[in-house]
Amino acid sequence: MIVSSLRPVNQRINRAISSLARSRFGLFGAAHTRDSTTGPAVAPRSTLPERLKTHLPTLVLLASLVIVFILRYIAVRQHLDMGQDIANYLTTMNTFFGNDVAGTGLLRPPLIALPLKAFALVFGNLNGAKLLGISISVAMALPFYLIARRVSHRWIAVAMTMLFVITPAYANMLSWGYITMFGIFFTLLALYFFVSILESPTKRNIIFAGICTSLVFGFHQLTAAFFVPLFIVFLAALLVLNRDLLLKRLKPFVAGAVVAAILSIPYIPLYIRLLGMQSSEGSDAALSANLFVEFAHGVWYLPWIWAVALVMVIALVGIAWLRRHEQNTATLLAVLLIFSIALMVFTLPPPFVELNRRAHFFLYVPIWAITGFLLSRLWSWRISLTSSILQRLPRLVTIVLVASLLISGVVVSQRDLCRGLDFYSYLDDTRWNAVQWIETYTPEDARIAAYPENLGWWIEAEAERTTFEVTERNMQSLSLKRQRALVAERLLSRNRGMENGYIRIATSYPYTNAPGNPVFAAYVGGKYQDLLMFDDSQSTVQIAGLGTFNMTEATTKEFSIHGDSASMETVVSYRFHDATITQTATLRQDSQTAVVAYTIQSDDQAVIRLHLPSFFCYHPESVLSDPEHGSIEVVQKLETPFDGVVPITTRLAVDVTGATLELPSIQEDYIALALDIHSTNASVQLTLDVSTDQVPSSGQVVAYEVTQIIEEHAIGYLAVDLKPTSGTWSDLPHGLEQWLDACPYYKRVYPLDGAGVVMIYQVDTSALPQT
């Protein structure tokens, strides 16, 4: 009788144990049941509806990912290209498969070439590169889902996986360069399998952990640099928090690391070469910006500090709670969270400083995983009340929260993708036609200087020609790229010049009717930006009894350059009958001031008037004149690739001897300077001082000559986009197109009618001065 009375109690206990056996928390998934009579675990034969029910979350996840893929493809197809870096991926593909047009070898790990080649063969270069990017952007769901389902209810794991995939930061990244997504994909897989080794040290887990880790190194050098310290920190955390299990599984854990090391050996020479190519020149200020300092100094972002801090606190509390149930996964998520935040706050030295800018991409893994765990606990919470509505309240709240996050996430993600495409997309039909012309009509060994960087990337990727593109040298860590950028920049800066790292003075001499002699430029945004220029065809001299002449009508014109690395000057002498006007431009080491002086020597005061207009290269924000002190202040706002709009203040001070300066006239595009000459030996000195909010570079004074650069680097063509559509590049300054057309050794070959946006010039080597 006693046994009979206890039987119902035993049945209830067995049902409870069976329920717990189906999941770690009684929440997630199904498991084998145990037959109390026979002892061993038995996997009951399931029916088709039961199997469908078991796999339904995975099927829903796959269907949702297909929808995301379609939405992203619809957004992407509206642009000819998709971001700036996919041209570089195509160049890597070409180099890997034997067509290294630049002769530089691989400049990034090679494995991106394999899937990209497959997509390019099927869909073509442009569409293949775009479809591969969209594919990896949704494929990132796989490794995250493997982690999320360990800590969350299976349906909530599906929802969190979708929220992870539609994270706005990832949508924006898709529009400028998706190779980091490959790094995230394989990093998460590698960490997942290393955690699996701790629980089940099978050969499968060991081999997959090693393979996925090696793929991190084979796809993306920055992610590899992120992965190595992350893995070390994770190992140290396990040693502290779960020492017994780690020591028990140490051999298989080390075996996985050994497999990874062996499979990564082929990439070691490339990494050593890339480290050797790192440039120590220039400023890395743009790269080493500290996110925390940026937030703290911006009042606009101040509310986000508290929001981010609150999220971090909740995440850490959630991790501490999760650790009671899933210790190894909790340790992994804690390491990912803390390591990512540390990189966002504390900057690394070059060449690893770029990691600080990308650390937040790894932050969303622990945030969404812990969010899923907390929502799962809310879902399983039971309220001991009689009302059925109140009993369902936790689940209703969970459903509302998840639905709200998903709806808002899709909207914001798609909006950020479209904004990113509008901002970073460069190609259109006109520019694509120019690239196709280069591919069709230039020799395969042609070397082309290009502006902007985007145009150069596409010429190298699609036309497969060696390019020297103007780029933001402060953002370029490879010395090879920095040097090529300087070459291209000088080719577009008139004929001769001298520079000291702060400012540049360039001249168009010996051209006739070419604007800009000299041109004054400041080093802003990683390259020299033209600010003010003089123009011989607009500068005039009035000679008594003979009339008015512009400076290009001088009977003789001589040029010379003198000095050393401490100080240098260019001298241009203009002869008009019995009068000589000498222009001297001076530049000193570590100086932000340039001096342009004119001296007038004439018999019997033949020169009676000198007109020297100074033209704005960009429309000024403001121009202030101080006649009493003979000075003019010009503020120009330049849009730079990574620093945004930068205000440049140029102070033009005028000092006159033996002449009288008329009140300067401020016109829409120039400052009219006019002098009445009172002496046979008069002079005017124009001092141009520049100041910016940026920390400028500095160096010795260096002189260059474009003709020598062309011969030294065998440059055959110039491809110039006069009006780049991307928000990261500025229109070229006033006068440059006229100067290119007037250059005796540049011949326009596309478009011949001059109606295009991209102008292509061929170098006429026969017109180069003989040395």
Image (tube, rainbow, N blue to C red):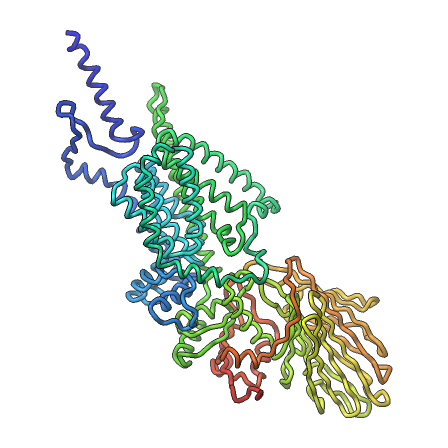
**Left or right: 181 with respect to 499?**
left
- Front residue of 262/474: it is 262
Residue 401 visible in the snapshot: no
* x then y, percent, for residue 500: 65, 68
Q: Is residue 270 above or below residue 1?
A: below
**Left or right: 498 with respect to 80?**
right
* Residue plotted at (78% across, 77% down): 674
Task: Tell me the quarter of the picture where residue 692 sits.
Answer: bottom right
- Front residue of 701/343: it is 701
Q: Is residue 483 above or below residue 755?
A: above
* Residue plotted at (45% across, 32% down): 317
Task: Tell me the quarter of the picture where residue 602 sits.
Answer: bottom right
> Total number of numbered labels?
0
Q: Is residue 305 above or below residue 691?
A: above
* x then y, percent, for residue 330: 39, 35
Q: Quadrant of the N terminus?
A: top left
**For the view shown, which residue lies furthest in the top direction?**
1
* Residue plotted at (20% across, 16% down): 10
Residue 340 visible in the snapshot: yes
- Front residue of 510/698: it is 698
